[in-house]
Image (cartoon, rainbow, N blue to C red):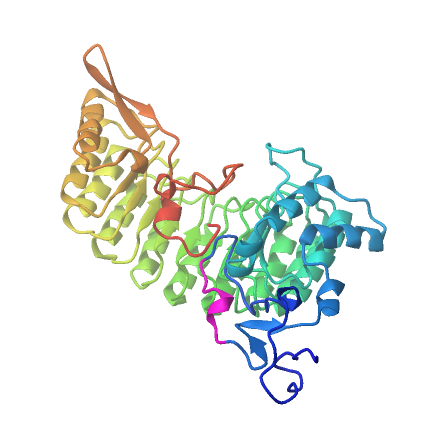
Amino acid sequence: MRVPTTAAGRASTAGPPASPPASCLRPARPAALGNGSIAKHRSPWSSPAPRGSHGGLAWVPIAQVMSVPSDLHQRYVQACQNLGQPENPFIAHVLQEADKNDETRWTKGITLKIAGNNHLVPVQRVTGDDLQVLASVLRDTVFVTGLDLRCNVLTDSGAKNVAALLQENSTLRYLNLMFNDIGTSGAELIAGALHRNKTLVYMRMTGNKIGNKGGMFFASMLQINSTLEKLDLGDCDIGMECLIAIATALTQNKSVKAINLNRPLLYSQEEETTVHVALMLKNNSSLVELHLCKHEMRNFGVERLCEALYENSSLRYLDLSCNKITRDGVKFLGELLKLNQTLEILDLNANRIEDDGAIYLSEALALYNRTLQALSVVSNNISGKGLVALSDAMKTNMELSYIYIWGNKFDEATCMAFSELIQTGRLTPNRTDVEPYEVDGHIHLAELSHGLRRHYYWTPSCGEVTKKDANASLAIAAVSEHL
């Protein structure tokens, strides 16, 4: 009996073919998969069966199926032998665990979490040679849509293998290289690969000291790449020229929805970079999330940003934490909030807005704004007067659901006000960073481990983030998976 061919092959002999044995059937792989390990996409089985198929399954001869190992671990062992490289037991363990989720990987895609800071299993950190083997395995593996290589020992030589993977793999959507040892030349290779890559959605370079020159390669990439949605260059030692180049590129780029430019190395007090970012915001209509933490920003810079945001209708998340903003700068933000209808998250953590600044914000939130959902004023030298004003604003503004106040000066009035908000249900415990308790008839506030970016530098070692409302940036303005 002749085995029926696939849809691309010749038709089988006349007459209805007999059903082949189950061992001869192999599922046709999906052409595209979702973002991250748990992205929700339609099952590939839901599409119509192609011509020459049986019950939605393409008929493939057994010999052809057996020629390509179906599990990742088997292919990894074979690749190590072919390249003459020793096996990395940590990579082998992760691939074995991935092989157990056979059904999930074909329907939803998976993220391989090969993080060097995993404390649950013995870890041998990934080197460039290890990545060379892994890249050869993932080159044509369509169900791996995310790769987490944070906290390993990848250097510029390892970046060559990263670049090769980005050029050859057509399904990877998430790549995390946070806190490796990639420098300027490695950044050039990776950014160059992204010139041609058409599938990667989220790239995280956090903590790799690529410097100003390395950042310029990513700025050039943003002028060409049209698929990347989120780029994290925080803690990468980028400089003023790089920030200006990125801001210029984002003026024309329409695909990037979130960018992290935290902690650049700036040696000027003129705030030129903030001025260029403000000019970008006037013209950009796609950016949703912007992080400008540790930019040495002062009130002048805040004023320029607010002027631009009057003309911007897309930004939902603005991070101005760890700057030098005082009550005068927050006055501009208060006036902006009276008219702005898009901003949902405002992070002013670790500035110095004091009571007057808190009152400016509370007036805008109580009487005008009905779109802001989360506010962080942690460590801003606010005392009872300002904190009580913010609590009063929450009584009239039902949209403001997340507020973080730890690190300020709590008096009894503050403790009573926030205790009342929590006890009446206006403020739920998962949406703030304080919890009331009573001692000798007096109410006090204790700190909770909640915040806007609770899982930025770390994620749970076991499983996914379950309580996303304790991390407001995930619960409110998520651009894509893995934020």
* Outermost residue toward the top in this view: 440
Q: Is residue 15 above or below residue 424?
A: below
Most foreground residue, 466 or 386: 466
**Quadrant of the rendered image containing residue 391:** top left
* Outermost residue toward the right in this view: 84
Q: Is residue 468 above or below residue 309?
A: above
Q: Which corner quadrant holds the N terminus?
A: bottom right
Magenta run includes residue 361: no
Please name the residue shown 67% across and 42% down the image: 93
Name the side, left or right, on which 128 lies relative to 304: right
Q: Residue 158 at x, y = what percent? A: 73, 51
Name the side, left or right, on which 428 lies relative to 164: left
Please name the residue shown 64% across and 87% down the image: 11
State which region is magenta. 40-48
Q: Main secondary structure of the magenta part?
A: loop
Q: Residue 99 at x, y = what percent? A: 62, 50
Name the side, left or right, on which 100 lies relative to 159: left
Q: Residue 67 at x, y = what percent? A: 76, 64
Q: Residue 124 at x, y = what percent? A: 71, 37
All told, the count of numbered labels is: 0
Most foreground residue, 263 or 258: 258
Q: Is residue 461 above or below residue 269?
A: above
